[in-house]
Amino acid sequence: ILSQVNHRNVVNLFGCCLETEVPLLVYEFISNGTLHEHLHVSAPLSLPWKERKRIALEIARALAYLHSSASVSVIHRDIKTTNILLDDRLTAKVSDFGASRGIPIYQTSVTTTIQGTFGYLDPECYNTRRLTEKSDVYSFGVMLVELLTREKPHIYMTAAGYSLVEQFLILHRQDKLSEILDPQVAKEGEEEARVVAEITAMCVSSSGEDRPTMKQVEMRLEVQSSATSIKTLQELRST
């Protein structure tokens, strides 16, 4: 299945090496580390907000393609910042398909064992063992929370026992998003971040039926990106 996947934001699988004791998959080499490494630096400033938005859009495009444009619907099952590689131009490449599943186009779900990473794992899939495309949508939403807050989902916990996603949703509903936003994001584009936060909240809904598809997420992020580009162009013209 992966040998048939061809997308600029998915790591290319070149083939399989059978000349070793254990067969090896051969992927293209991506030189610039993971999104996690670029986001969670010790310095006060991390990836610029505009780069985070662009990377999120590129990942959304890749997942929308995997879900609906490939010959078989491919569900990644482990979307997280450590599985997003960046090249020298910081172009996002979805990688690590070790947990992925292919689902025939005539099926909408499959019953399977639980796989994924704590903090990013779809709670509905965890409870029902039913894997759908919406499981990737949830994990993508968690990653958006991470990009907005620069907090690590797998270790974040409030004094009251709330996870990163739970705390994000509470503050979002109370219109107190600024309390959890990365200060860098608030400074560089708080208005845009609030729009992305609306998309994020839908992605991390506890019910898969209430989540958008990755294609819908891609389209919403595209519109937001286009609106920002137009606004920037107008500001440049006015000066």
Image (spheres, grey):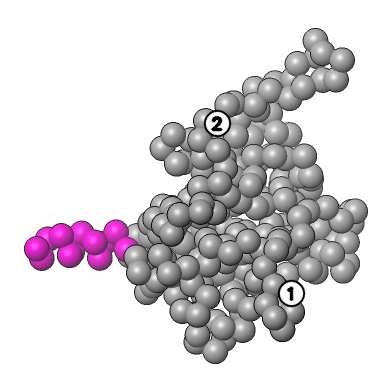
> Would you place residue 141 above or below residue 55 in this image?
below
Q: Which mark is residue 114?
A: none
**Left or right of 72 on screen, residue 203:** left
Q: Amino acid at mark 2?
A: Ile
Asked whether the residues under the numbered discs 2 and 1 touch, taking CB atoms below 8 Å apart as contact, a structural biologist would say: no
Provide the residue designation for mark 1. 207
Where's residue 118, x and y in %?
77, 60
Residue at the image position 46 percent from the left and 61 percent from the top: 221
Where's residue 11, x and y in %?
60, 34
Q: Amino acid at mark 1?
A: Ser
User: From which residue to which does the magenta span run?
Assistant: 228-239
**Tag 1's secondary structure?**
loop
**Tag 2's secondary structure?**
loop
Main SS of residues in magenta: helix
Q: Earlier in the sequence, mark 2 or mark 1?
A: 2
Judge by depth and name the residue closer to the eye, 70 or 144.
144
Mark 2 vs mark 1, CA separation in Å = 35 Å
Where's residue 223, x and y in %?
40, 63
Residue at the image position 10 percent from the left and 65 percent from the top: 238
Provide the residue designation for mark 2. 30
